[in-house]
């Protein structure tokens, strides 16, 4: 069976860009507040907004290391699409195409999987 997919190797320390919904912006700001409260830094709302803005580009994408993105948003599971647009931009010069055969790549449906 021909492999129709391209597999890439990506280091989780590299950055991804994600566009947040309004609900996602509030969720991320709450996350920042929680982090600063945990380490006893009393940040004003203005300081939190300024910190948030430093990580946002002109197209309204938030940049985070992939592991941090998963730490913050991964726990949302099935409702993640209420908080973010599900298309991520992998911001890396180091995406490495690899040859890798796996069940997910080799089988297009469960009938093929059972063979």
Image (cartoon, helix red, strand yellow):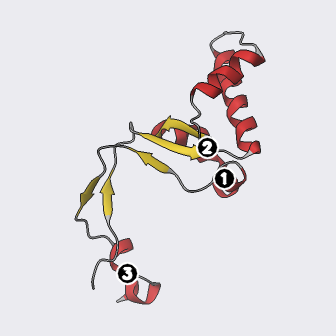
Mark 2 sits on what residue? Answer: 73
Of the 4 image quadrants, the one containing the C terminus is: bottom left
Instruction: For label 2, count other residues whose C-alpha is less than 10 Å away and answer few (under 14), some (14-19) or many (20+).
Output: some
Instruction: For label 3, count other residues whose C-alpha is less than 10 Å away and answer few (under 14), some (14-19) or many (20+).
Output: some
Residue drawn where x is 59% and y is 33% of the image: 56
Mark 3 lies on a secondary structure that is loop
Marked residue nearer the N-terminal end (2 or 1): 2
Mark 1 sits on what residue? Answer: 80
User: x%, y% of residue 70?
Assistant: 53, 43
Mark 2 lies on a secondary structure that is helix
User: x%, y% of residue 32?
Assistant: 66, 25
Q: Residue furthest left?
A: 99
How far apart marks 2 and 1 lie (CA) works out to 7 Å
Mark 3 sits on what residue? Answer: 107
Residue 95 marker: none
Marked residue nearer the N-terminal end (3 or 2): 2
Q: Are marks 2 and 1 in contact (CB under 8 Å)?
A: yes
Residue drawn where x is 39% and y is 41% of the image: 12
Which of discs 3 and 1 lies nearer the camera? The answer is: 1
User: x%, y% of residue 37?
Assistant: 69, 16
């Amino acid at each position: 069976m021909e492999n129709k997919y391209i597999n890439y190797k990506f280091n989780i320390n590299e950055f991804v860009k994600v566009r947040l919904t309004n609900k996602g912006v509030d969720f991320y700001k709450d996350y920042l507040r929680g982090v600063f409260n945990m380490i006893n830094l009393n940040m004003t709302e203005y300081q939190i907004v300024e910190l948030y803005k430093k990580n946002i580009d002109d197209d309204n994408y938030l940049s985070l290391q992939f592991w941090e993105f998963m730490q913050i948003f991964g726990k949302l599971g099935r409702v993640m699409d209420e908080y973010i647009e599900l298309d991520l931009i992998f911001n890396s010069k180091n995406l490495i195409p690899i040859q890798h055969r796996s069940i997910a790549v080799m089988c297009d449906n469960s009938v093929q999987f059972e063979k």
